[in-house]
Amino acid sequence: MPELITDPRDPRVADFHDLHAGDRRPGTERRSGPVVVEGVTAVERLLETGLQLRALYGVAGRLAALDIPAGVPAYEADKWVVSETIGFRLTRGVLASAERPVPPSLADVLARSRRIAVLEGLNDHENIGSIGRSAVALGVDALLLDPSCADPYYRRSVRVSMGHLLTLPVVALEDWPGDLATVRAAGFTTVALTPDPGAVDLRSLDPVDHPRTALLLGAEGPGLTDGAMAAVDVRARIPMRSGVDSLGVAAAAAVAFAQLR
């Protein structure tokens, strides 16, 4: 039975205080702290992952829709108290906090994967979330992130992914772009996605001829760095109608994932 919360600053729901304040609390290390998940569907997906839950918090009706494991602290409040706790109006009605996934090693991910996505310089949390959702839907086995990427487990990333990011192996690379040599040595064809008209047509890359593929995606605007481009096997572009030079990175990722699966 969930416990009733009437004070927005109740320490029992400290994981959910002031979620509008940024991707991490002042004084905490980057890519640290609990994962916060919003909405019944995403929380249900969290419950299926086996991650260690810290707390559930929401309005009574949304909490009642969940099969809450025994021993997990659950707290309910009216929508105004919840909104005051988190710092914005919550429309999805429920939140959960959990410990972060234990990161797999690069070697383990490469050994178990057939298709991977490698992200460089993506600092938009919602783009990372959208890419994660498309990756799971379209057969990508893991995400590799360069050191400058935003936190894939920040609340907005997880929300946009509908919780799918929590089911996808994610590796934070430390040696960039040097780790691309490790990816290639593991048997992956490295493909840089670029709008450059001199790049090959993405449709010319037959997945049968390239059974293991690592697709590199850069931030919108600057794209991939020269160092990353120099380290890949193939530069590929998505063919588009005249007058359109590129797609947003999340849309481009989905197109490429579908083509290379």
Image (cartoon, helix red, strand yellow):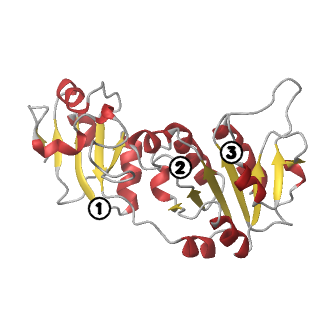
Q: In the picture shown, does residue 209 fall above or below 163?
A: below
Quadrant of the rendered image containing residue 208: bottom right
- Which residue shows up at 87% across the image and 49% down it? 203
- Residue 103 lies, in percent from the top left, at 44, 66
Q: Which residue is mark 1?
A: 52
Camera-nearest label, 1 or 2: 2
Image quadrant in which the C terminus is located: bottom right
State how far apart marks 3 and 2 are (Cα).
19 Å
- Residue 179 lies, in percent from the top left, at 63, 66
State how far apart marks 1 and 2 are (Cα).
27 Å
Q: In the picture shown, does residue 261 fall above or below 17?
A: below
Camera-nearest label, 3 or 2: 2
At label 2, the amino acid type is Ser
Could you tell whether 86 is left or right of 254 in the image? left
Could you tell whether 233 is left or right of 27 in the image? right
Q: Secondary structure at mark 1?
A: loop
- Which residue shows up at 49% across the image and 51% down it? 164
Q: Secondary structure at mark 2?
A: loop
Q: Which residue is mark 3?
A: 253
